[in-house]
Amino acid sequence: MPTPAQLASARDDWKAAPRTEKVAVLARWAAALGISVSTLYRQFNVLGDRGPARPREDTRPEYRDYARVVMQQMAKSPEGTIPVHLALDSCFKPNPDTGEVLLPPSAAQMPLATLQRILTDELGARQRKRRTRRLHADHANQAWLIDASTSKYLTVEQELPDGDYVLRLWRNPFPASGYKNKPLGPDRARLIYYGVWEMLTGYKSARPTVARGETGLDAMESLVYFFTQRTDPRDPLHGLPDDLWSDQGPLLKYGATADLLDRLGVNVPPCAPYQKERMGGVEQVWARLWQSFEQSIFLHAPATGRYELKLSQLTARLGEYLARENARTSRSDPTLTRAAHWVRSINQQGGARLCPANPIETLAREKRCKVDQSGIIRWDNTEYEVPKLHSCWVIARRALDGSGRVVVEDERTGERYDVTPYQGLKYNEWKGSQPALPIDKARAAAAALPLPGDVYAPAPADAAPANVVTGRFGPRQQPARGLPDPLEADRYASLSAAMAEFFQVFGAPLSAENRAVVEQRLLRDGLRKDAVRELALILSTATRTTGAAS
């Protein structure tokens, strides 16, 4: 703590300084004494040189009376949204019948800023907007924001035979029939926009879809569209982001899509719904979309009568609108456009993380089921027969591609099995009947196989790669990492399980050197069951031929 002599010198210097330099003198003395400015102020109070702060003298008490009259004029609107300056001007207009005015001419000298301060701070007529920190990212694809929104002026009229849709334009904002997450009837649909906002550059991308309501599968299909590189060189945004910000919508509530995002390595930070400040980036996408894009349709629509357009035409117009939006100045670097800034930043990182091919095909519903004593599980009123498992718990997964394929995973060992719906034996059949030989099963399977193509048919020419280079140098790419398939069933859960099956077929010990070679070969083949059995049979045959076991 400074000595009394040092504090007295600081006090004298502070008192002698001009009014405009007192703050700088305090800061200089606080730094020299090694204390904070607030601590120095408290020491001045101890010395008795700073008394308690005196309240500000009220020189214009009539201003509060004027502000109350203005607030009464503002309250004539149901939401109290009449602007302050209009309400103030109306107070000087005489009444048509009596000629009375609400405020005297001296009220016109009241500054508008003072009136707004009294209305906000003292009378509570208006609330100050809470200031929040601007969202910031350090590099491209570090964070995306995604959200869905319904159209404001377009409705779905009918579906065409080619899969396209006819949309109708309304002159007034069309009220949504129910919340967008609540599905409509089977013969009705909504136009829903899915959009993303890239946090570093402010890059915008959106995609219109037609559906009965917002669903996790539709949102995931749109996300895969954003993850995948497009052919338009003006739209370079692609790749997997590190973080994906979203509200608690169907994308996260749907277990299959949340599992796919986790397997893709995309982190989803928790975010409560209706947080306009945190989701402000993507909310700005919708504000501009309604104000600039959908409003522009009225420029070429007739003033009267019905106007319709197709979904494909709307998608093409939206692509042109987004290309112009992304040609605007980047939010982080005013010298570059949003597209150019994203390309430069992603190249500095070594390229974008590519999305694996067809990730939607790996979506699967998941449920924990109990295998009964007969080896049967029950899911949605359907019984499935599980091979080799009885009286245990399993994780069942069902494909969403319409095939109905179900795979179960043993919770104890991690081994997976394909299961089929249970079918009881027909009348006069029993399990002890003579099983068919393997060659008989092969003949039956061969009869059902389609005819193969010509083995000597000319190979098709490779398609020329799409030109997606932006500027002189296009965006680099990183190779897509392997995506674990939750429906893969023809492999062993671990190397120890695969080696146990190998020795059961091989029937002889191995030296340490040969065992290491076999383990490396099995790991290279992905621990597939057919590869383990094939390798064991080959080595067993070779051992019997040479007459010596390794």
Image (cartoon, rainbow, N blue to C red):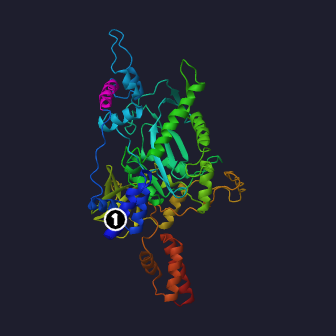
Q: How many marks?
A: 1
In which quadrant of the rendered view does residue 322 lie? top right
The N terminus, quarter of image: bottom left
Q: Measuring 36% from the left and 36% from the top, which residue is drawn there?
A: 117
What is the secondary structure assignment of the residue under circle 1? helix
Question: Picture coordinates of residue 191 (x, y %)?
Answer: 48, 35
**463 drawn magenta:** no
> Does the magenta stretch mainly form a helix, a strand or a loop?
helix
Question: Picture coordinates of residue 231 (x, y %)?
Answer: 64, 48
Question: Picture coordinates of residue 487 (x, y %)?
Answer: 44, 59
**72 drawn magenta:** yes
Q: Amino acid at mark 1?
A: Ala
On screen, residue 50 versus residue 207, left or right, reads left
The reply to whether residue 490 is visible in this rendering is yes
The reply to whether residue 386 is visible in this rendering is no
Q: Identify whether 522 is placed above or below 121.
A: below
Q: Identify whether 280 is placed above or below 23.
A: above
The residue that disc 1 covers is: 8
- How packed mark 1 is, by other alpha carbons closer than 10 Å (few <14, some 14-19, many 20 or more), is some
Which residues are drawn in magenta?
61-75
On screen, residue 396 versus residue 402, left or right, reads left
Q: Residue furthest bottom?
A: 548
Q: Measuring 50% from the left and 47% from the top, which residue is drawn there?
A: 196
Nearest the camera: 297 or 376? 297
Nearest the camera: 542 or 46? 46
